[in-house]
Amino acid sequence: MDFSLFYFANNDTEERDRYRLLLDGARFADDNGFTAVWTPERHFHPFGGLYPNPSVTGAAVAAVTQRVAVRAGSVVAPLHHPMRIAEEWSVVDNLSGGRAGVALASGWHAADFALRPENYETRKSGLMETVETIRRLWRRESVSLTDGAGETVELTMFPPPVQPELPMWLTSGGTPATFTLAGEHGMGMLTHLLGQEVEVLAQRIEEYRRAHREHQPASAGQGHVAVMVHTFVGTDRDAVRETVREPFSRYLASSFDLLIKAAEAAGAQGADMSRELRSMGPEDRQFLVAQAFDRYFETSGMFGTVDDCMAMLKQLKDAGVDEVACLVDFGVPTDAVIGGFEHLARLHDTWRAHLGS
């Protein structure tokens, strides 16, 4: 089971050097045997809003590293033309010497589709068509497009990529159909533990593996499952709890606000949820956030000492996870996160030693 770093910052501070943690973390990952660095695509909100384009942040990561894979987690496919996705990630592939990889998502927040409102209703149905188009372009095949004069033209993507195939994942918060879809199409699976217990995740992974076996040749292996996990490792569990309590609670509260806006955007379908959430007073919200913090700290994150985190790693390994993507930028001050990297490196090495024992 591999380790990687994952970024999805809640940008609610006035810190000027906003990308120091990204770049220092990428160097750390590169130097300590980690597999990849993932950056997301988010728009118009502090929650994740440091990352409006993962190909841009990916290019920065590629420039300061030599070994780690440079991945999008995730590109919101309906917001972009497939040719643009292929072009941008071919640039990253060239800058990195063949280390690019992309997870794709259909998108869920209506406000993001201010960029391409015409694609909101068909965001799910058109996802796999985008995947196949990117695959064709990456193989240097031409596609038929309409130019500015209304003429049909055959166009090929430039620059030529380094890798013959672009590693691709689908992103899901736990929807069974998405796991099956990824397996059927020979893609990896990128998911998380927010609202998804490890036991349920294990069932989803088995469904993914089954679909992969049934639809892909044996030579394609069993697929790949990466799980994003909020992570902070230290030498004392209680000290870690107090270090992460306030910033992670802010992080959860910010996502809570985003959930309200998403429910409102869903129209009648989300009206009841939106009213219920907005009717809560400050004390009720604070109570919910506190409950969520305790639950995630105990069961859904990698928080605490190396021994504490080893227990979570063993659960994930037993569930069938191939890669743990450690989300490190959820609001703990940058210096503290960077200072904790030595403990994360020790966790990585301890896990490697455990696998070899």
Image: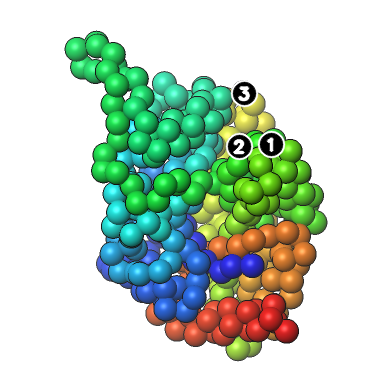
Q: Which class describes the residues within 10 Å of circle 1: few (<14), some (14-19), or many (20+)?
A: few
- The quadrant of the picture occupied by the C terminus is bottom right
* Residue mark closest to the camera, 2 vs 1: 1
Q: Circles 2 and 1: CB distance less than 8 Å?
A: yes
Residue 70 shows up from this direction: yes
Up/down of 4 relative to 278, above or below: below
Q: Earlier in the sequence, mark 2 or mark 1?
A: 2
Residue 347 visible to the viewer: no
Check disc 2 and report the residue beneath it: 185
Question: Element at badge 1?
Answer: helix
Q: Can you give x and y, in whole percent of width and height, for residue 269 in the image? A: 64, 26
Kind of residue at badge 3 = Ala
- Labels 3 and 1: the sequence-earlier one: 1
Find residue 283 and report its horizontal and vertical position in percent. Answer: 64, 57
Mark 3, residue position: 268
Tell me how far mark 3 sits from mark 1, CA to CA: 38 Å
User: Mark number for residue 201?
Assistant: none
Q: Residue at x 68, y 60 (%)?
A: 321
Quadrant housing residue 19? bottom left
